[in-house]
Image (cartoon, coloured by chain):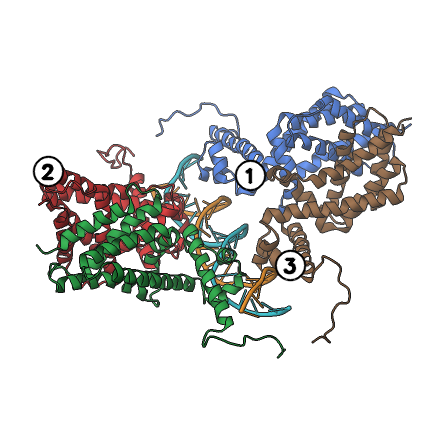
Chain colours: A brown, B blue, C red, D green, E orange, F cyan
Amino acid sequence: MGLLPRPLFTEPGLSLAMIRTADKHAKIIEAAIRVFSRKGFFHARIADIAKEAQVADGTIYLYFNNKYDILISLFEEEIGKIILEVKLLLDSEAGDDPRKMLRVFALHHLQLMDDRRELAEVLQMELRQSNKFMREYRLTKFSEYLDIISGIVKQGQQQGIFRPDVLPGVFKRAFFGALDETARLWVLSPDHPYSIEETANQITDVFIRGINTD
Amino acid sequence: MGLLPRPLFTEPGLSLAMIRTADKHAKIIEAAIRVFSRKGFFHARIADIAKEAQVADGTIYLYFNNKYDILISLFEEEIGKIILEVKLLLDSEAGDDPRKMLRVFALHHLQLMDDRRELAEVLQMELRQSNKFMREYRLTKFSEYLDIISGIVKQGQQQGIFRPDVLPGVFKRAFFGALDETARLWVLSPDHPYSIEETANQITDVFIRGINTD
Amino acid sequence: MGLLPRPLFTEPGLSLAMIRTADKHAKIIEAAIRVFSRKGFFHARIADIAKEAQVADGTIYLYFNNKYDILISLFEEEIGKIILEVKLLLDSEAGDDPRKMLRVFALHHLQLMDDRRELAEVLQMELRQSNKFMREYRLTKFSEYLDIISGIVKQGQQQGIFRPDVLPGVFKRAFFGALDETARLWVLSPDHPYSIEETANQITDVFIRGINTD
Amino acid sequence: MGLLPRPLFTEPGLSLAMIRTADKHAKIIEAAIRVFSRKGFFHARIADIAKEAQVADGTIYLYFNNKYDILISLFEEEIGKIILEVKLLLDSEAGDDPRKMLRVFALHHLQLMDDRRELAEVLQMELRQSNKFMREYRLTKFSEYLDIISGIVKQGQQQGIFRPDVLPGVFKRAFFGALDETARLWVLSPDHPYSIEETANQITDVFIRGINTD
DNA sequence: TATGAATGAGCTTTCATTCAT
DNA sequence: CATGAATGAAAGCTCATTCAT
C-alpha cells in the first residue's frame, strides 16, 4: 500500500476536491454561456444548462443559488477576466499614450466580441435586463470596465492631449456604446462587411479626432 | 334594431367601429409600454396589460395575435412615430447643414428618452432580445431610424464637409450606440448629473470634430 | 330579442356566476377531503385533488391561494357547519339540562366521526400539524367548537348541578380529547366493537358522574 | 495491522464497535426529536438531522433504512422508555390502589409532556399520521402504553372499587385522550394557566368519580 | 465505518391562450 | 365585439438516497 504512487508535491491549499469543484463551477458557467446565447436567459431551462454541462439538474444548485445567480456570476467572472486582459494589454502595448490606449481598448473589445461570439451575445442581450431586474446585484465589474475608458480620458487630459472640456463620464459611455452597438451587428449577422481592425480604427479615429486638442 | 342611430356621414374607409378599434388598439399599446417598462416583457402578464388598459384579458387577443405581437407592434408603431417626428424636425430646424442635423438628431433622441421614460426603458431593455428571438419580424422601422443617420453622413460627404473615408454604415451605429448607451444611464438612475442639452452637445461635438474635414 | 325569456325574479346579489363559483369551491373542498383522507395532506398532490374534483389543476388556484389554503378553508368551513348543527341539536333536543347537553354533544360528535369517515380522518390527522405550522391561521372555528363544551359546564355550574371547582377550560379539553381519541380508533379500524350509542353513553356517563355535585 | 491494539477484555456481546454504534444511533434519534419538533416530520430534512447530530448525511443511512424508519424507531424507543418509567413508578408509588395508579399515570404523563417538550411535540404531531401511513409498523409500543390504563381499570373492577359496567377498552382511550388533548395545549402555548399537578388532579378527579362504585 | 458530492424524480404554481356566453 | 373563467403545459427548485473514496 505504501507503494501506491502518491503526488510528491501538492500545491498547498488546493485539494483534489477543490479542483473538482472549481472544475464543475466553470463547466456550468461555460454551458450557461452556450445555452443563454442560443435561447436567451428566459427561454433557457435549467435542464438545458445541466445537459450541456453534463451534470444533473440538482448539481447546478450545489454551485449556484438559482438561475439568476448563474447569470450574475457569469457576468462578473467573465467581465472580470476581460478587465484583466485589457489592462495587461494596455500596459504592454499602449505605453503611456492615451490615444494608443483608446485604440487598443477598441480593438480588444471588438476582437473579443468577435472571438467569443456566444459570450458576446449573452452580454449584448442580457446585461441590460439584468441591470434593471437584479438591482441587488450591482454589476460592479461592468462599471469597472467602463471606468477604464474614463481613466484613459483623464490621463489624456492631464497630459494635455485631450480637450479638458470633455466629460470623462459622458465620453466613457459614448465610446463604449459606439463599440458595443457596432459589435451587435455581428451578433445578429455574423459576416462583417469590413474587417475588425478597419472598423476599430474607423471608430477610434472619429473619437480621437473628436477629443484631441489641436 | 334598424332604428338604432347610425352616423349619417362616414369618412370613407374609417367607420365608427374602426375608430373604436383603433382606440382600443392604442389603449393596449400604451398599457403595454407602462407594464413592460415596470416589469419587463417576460415578467409582464397579459392580465397586467389588460388591467392597465381596462379591458378583459381576452379582448387583447382580438387586437393582437399573442404577447410577442404586442411587443413588435409597439416597436414598429412607436419607432414609426419617432421617425416621422425627427424627420419633421430635421426639415424644419436643421436646414441643409449636416452638422446641425446630427445635433438635432442627438438632442431629439436624448430628449425623447428623457421625456418618455417608460418607452425608453422598453426600447432599451427589450429591443435587443427581440432582434434575436423574433427573426420573422425584421424590426424594419429600427433600421429605418438608423438610416437617417447614415443619410446625414452621406449628405455631408457629398457636400464635402464630412471626411469621405468615414463609412456611413459604421458611423450610424457608433453614433446611435453612443447616444443610446448614454440614455441608458438615465433609465437606471433617473437624475442626470448634466443637462440633456449639455450631454447632447458633448457627444455631438466629439462626433462632429471626429468626422469634419480639415 | 325582447321576447327571450328572462328570469322574472332574481335573488338580489346572487348571480349565476356566483352560484357556479360557489359550486366549484365546494367541489374542490369535497374532493380535497377525499384525497387528504386517502393520502394525507403532504402526500396529496394538487393534481390528485383537481382530478377528483374534475377540474384543471390551475382552476384550483382560482379558488384557493395554495395547498395550505385548501386545508385551512376545509377546516374552517366544515367545523363551521358542525358547530351550527350541534348548536341546533342542543337547542332542539337537550332543553336546558346540561347533562343532556353533554350527552347530545358526545353522541353527535361520535356519530359525525362515524358518518363522515373521510372528514374525520382529515381532522384527526391534519388538525394538529396545522395548528403548529400555520400559525397565521388561528383555527378559530375549532376553538369555538370546544367552547360549546365549556359553555355547557358553566351553565351546569350556575344551575348548581355541576361541581363548581371543575375548571371549564380543563374540562372542555378533557371531554373533547376523550371523544376524539375514541373516534380515532374507528378511523384506524373501521369496525367498532361497541355501538356508537353505547360508546357515547359510556364516556358521557363517566364524565357526568365525575362532574356532578352530590 | 494485526498489531493494532485490541481491547483485551470485551463485555460479552457488547463490543466497542457496538457501543459506538449505539452512541451514534442515539445521537441521531435525539437530533431527530429536536428537528422534528422544530419543523415537523415532512419539513425536516435528513441534512438537518445530520447537522444536528454532527454526522454526515450518509451516516444516517448506516443506522436507519430511511427517513420514516427514524420516526418509527424514535416512537418505539421513546415510548418504550416511558412505559418502563411509568411501570416502575406505579410499582413504587401507587401500591395496589387503582385510584392512586390512575393519579400517578396522569401526573407522570402530563409531567413528561411538560418536561420533554420536544418529544411531546413530535408525539402530538406525528403519531397520528404515522399510524395511518406506516401500517407495516404497528406502533405496538403505543398500544402497550394504553394497555397500562386498561390494566388498571380491570384491576380496580376486580377489587370492586371501579364500576364493572365500564368498558376498559373504552376507558383507556377516553382517559388517554383527555390527558393528551390537555397536554397539547401546552405544546401550542407553552405557559400553562394552571399547574401541572392541579390539572392532573382535575382530570383524574373527574375520571375517578366517574368510574368509582358507590 | 464515515463522508458529502452528486443524482434525478417529483410537485407546486404560473400564466398565455381559448371559448362559451 | 367583449368578457373572464377555465385550461393544462411547462419549469424551477428541493431533498431523500446513493456510492466512490
Chain on which label 2 sits: C
Front-most of B94 and D118?
D118
Residue C122 rendering spot, x and y as whole percentages: 30, 53
**Disc 3 element:** helix
Residue placed most toward the observer, D67 or D167: D167
Spatial separation of the CA atoms under disc 2 and disc 3: 79 Å
Q: Which residue is mark 3?
A: A53
Residue at image position (44%, 54%) is: D34
Which residue, given by chain and number where applicable, does mark 2 sit on? C159
Q: Which residue shows up at 79% across the image and 23% down it?
A: B100
Identify which residue is drawn at 54% across, 75% down. D7
Which of these two is toward me, D196 or A83? D196
Q: Is residue C15 left or right of residue B85?
A: left
Circle 1 residue: B70
Which structural element holds mark 2? loop
Contact between marks 1 and 3 (CB within 8 A): the answer is no
Task: Output the chain of dot 3.
Answer: A
Q: Nearer the viewer, mark 2 or mark 3?
A: 2
Question: Is residue B113 something one can see in this rendering?
Answer: yes
Which residue occupies the foreground of this view, A26 or C32?
A26
> Label 1 to label 3, Cα distance in Å?
35 Å
Give the label on residue D47, or none: none
Q: Position of residue D99 (x, y in %)?
A: 18, 56
**Amino acid beneath label 3:** Ala
**For numbered disc 1, what is the local secondary structure?**
helix
Which one is in front in this view, the residue at disc 1 or the one at disc 3? 3
The reply to whether the C-beta atoms of the residues labelled 1 and 2 are less than 8 Å apart is no
* Residue depicted at 53% across the width and 61% down the height: D57
Percent coordinates x, y for residue C41 in the rendering:
36, 54
Image coords of residue C38 (percent x, y): 32, 59
Name the amino acid type tagged 1.
Ile
